[in-house]
Image (tube, grey):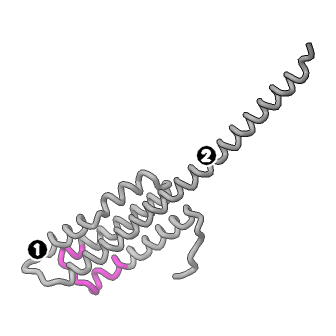
């Protein structure tokens, strides 16, 4: 009996199966990388949006009329909590790379310093809040830059 046709058929089948497995594995890796990138994009967008919303909300409350400083402080802190920033921050901590998480944490803390100043009675547009706003803008710019790099988007080129 001639074994050569049977061996060549088996070798061809083995090569075909290996090639299919290799191709499927590569396709799975590409899809997984694409999915991971999409998850990070969604998390980054939610976090940046929550930071922006929180900033606008605390500014609006700080500009409002309040019966007392305590009422103003309570209102500023409450709108900060209500924006969903803490949840967005936790999601970012779970999926973001260390450099992005560090920059996002800096942006969060810069906004929190601004919140605390408004809660303590600093007027919007005062010399007290100007350096805090500048620090917040710098932290936000750095965070966005790192997020864009991580997403492979590239720099904006806008100051």
Binning the other alpha carbons within 10 Å of mark 1 as few (below 14), some (14 to 19) or many (20 upward) gives: few
Classify residue 152 as left or right of residue 53. right
- What is the C-alpha distance between the residues marked 2 and 1? 55 Å
- Is 73 colored magenta in this rendering? no
Q: Residues in magenta?
A: 117-133
Residue 91 place in picture, x, y as percent: 38, 55
Residue 28 place in picture, x, y as percent: 61, 46
Q: Which residue is mark 2?
A: 28
The mark that comes first in sequence, 2 or 1, is: 2
Q: Which mark is residue 50?
A: none
| Observer-nearest of 113 and 54 | 54
Q: Residue at x 47, y 57 (%)?
A: 39
Please tell me whether mark 2 sits on a helix, a strand or a loop. helix
| Quadrant placement of the N terminus | top right
Question: Which marked residue is nearer to the observer: mark 2 or mark 1?
Answer: 2
Picture layout, residue 19 above or below residue 109: above
Picture layout, residue 118 above or below residue 38: below
Residue 83 place in picture, x, y as percent: 27, 67
| Observer-nearest of 142 and 151 | 151
Q: Which residue is mark 1?
A: 71
Q: Residue at x 58, y 73 (%)?
A: 155
């Amino acid at each position: 009996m001639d074994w050569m046709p049977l061996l060549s058929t088996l070798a061809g089948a083995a090569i075909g199966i290996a090639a299919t497995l290799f191709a499927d594995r590569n396709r799975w890796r590409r899809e997984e990388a694409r999915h991971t990138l999409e998850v990070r994009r969604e998390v980054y967008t939610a976090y940046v949006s929550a930071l922006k919303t929180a900033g606008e909300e605390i500014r609006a409350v700080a500009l409002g009329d309040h019966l007392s400083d305590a009422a103003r402080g309570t209102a500023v802190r409450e709108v900060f909590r209500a924006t969903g920033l803490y949840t967005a921050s936790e999601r970012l901590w779970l999926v973001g790379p260390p450099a992005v998480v560090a920059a996002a944490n800096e942006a969060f803390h810069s906004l929190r310093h601004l919140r605390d100043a408004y809660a303590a009675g600093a007027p919007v547009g005062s010399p007290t809040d100007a350096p805090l706003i500048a620090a917040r803008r710098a932290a936000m710019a750095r965070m966005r830059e790192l997020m864009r790099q991580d997403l492979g988007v590239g720099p904006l080129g806008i100051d």
